[in-house]
C-alpha cells in the first residue's frame, strides 16, 4: 500500500497525495510512509515543545522511542 499510515491505540489513519494538513492525532506509536516522503510536526511528550522530523519513502517504524503525544501537522512531498 502506498499511503501514509499512522497507527495508535484507536486504529489507523491513512493519508495520500502531496500537500500539508494541520491535524491533532494523539498517541501515534507506528508509521508507514508508503510511497511518500513525509514531514511531521509533533509534540513528542506532554509539555515538550513542537519539533519536526522527515521520514523517507517506504519507511516503517517509530519516529521516537515512545508513542508521540500529538502530531500537529503532516506534509507529504
Image (cartoon, grey):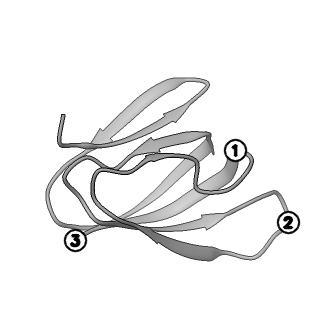
Q: In the image, which is nearer the foreground, mark 1 or mark 2?
A: 1
**Side of 46 where 73 appears, left or right:** left
**Residue 8 image offset from top left, x and y in percent:** 57, 32
Rendered-image quadrant of the C terminus:
bottom left
Q: Is residue 24 shown left or right of residue 59? A: right
Q: Earlier in the sequence, mark 1 or mark 3?
A: 1
Give the quadrant of residue 5. top left
Which one is in front, 42 or 59? 59
Asked if residue 24 lies left or right of residue 39, the reply is right
| Residue 37 drawn at (x, y percent) | 28, 65
Answer few, some or many: residues within 10 Å of disc 1's Cα (few below 14, many 20 plus, some between 14 and 19): some
Dot 1 or dot 2, earlier in sequence:
2
Could you tell me how far apart the alpha carbons at marks 3 and 2 are, in whole angstroms?
29 Å
Observer-nearest of 24 and 61: 61
The residue at 29%/50% (across/down) is 58
Instruction: Give the residue pinned by disc 2.
Output: 47
Viewer-side label of 3, 2: 3
Q: Which residue is mark 3?
A: 77
- Can you give x and y, in whole percent of width and height, for residue 21 in the image? 33, 64
Q: Which residue is mark 1?
A: 67
17 over 20 or under it: above or below: above
Which residue corresponds to the image point at 46% horizontal and 44% vertical from the top-left?
31
| Foreground pick, 9 / 62 | 62
Q: Residue furthest right?
A: 47
**Going 53% across and 52% down the picture, which residue do you hit?**
24
- Say above or below: 23 vs 52: above
Question: What's the CA distance linking mark 1 and mark 2?
Answer: 14 Å
Q: Secondary structure at mark 3?
A: loop
Crowdedness near tag 3: few (<14), some (14–19) or many (≥20) residues, C-alpha within 10 Å: some
Amino acid at each position: 500500500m502506498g499511503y501514509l499510515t499512522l497507527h495508535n491505540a484507536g486504529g489507523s489513519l491513512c493519508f495520500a497525495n502531496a500537500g500539508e494538513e494541520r491535524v491533532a492525532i494523539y498517541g501515534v506509536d507506528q508509521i508507514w510512509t508508503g510511497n511518500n516522503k513525509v514531514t511531521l510536526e509533533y509534540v513528542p511528550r506532554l509539555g515538550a515543545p513542537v519539533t519536526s522530523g522527515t521520514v523517507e519513502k517506504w519507511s516503517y517504524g517509530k519516529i521516537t522511542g515512545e508513542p508521540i503525544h500529538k502530531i500537529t501537522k503532516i506534509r507529504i512531498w
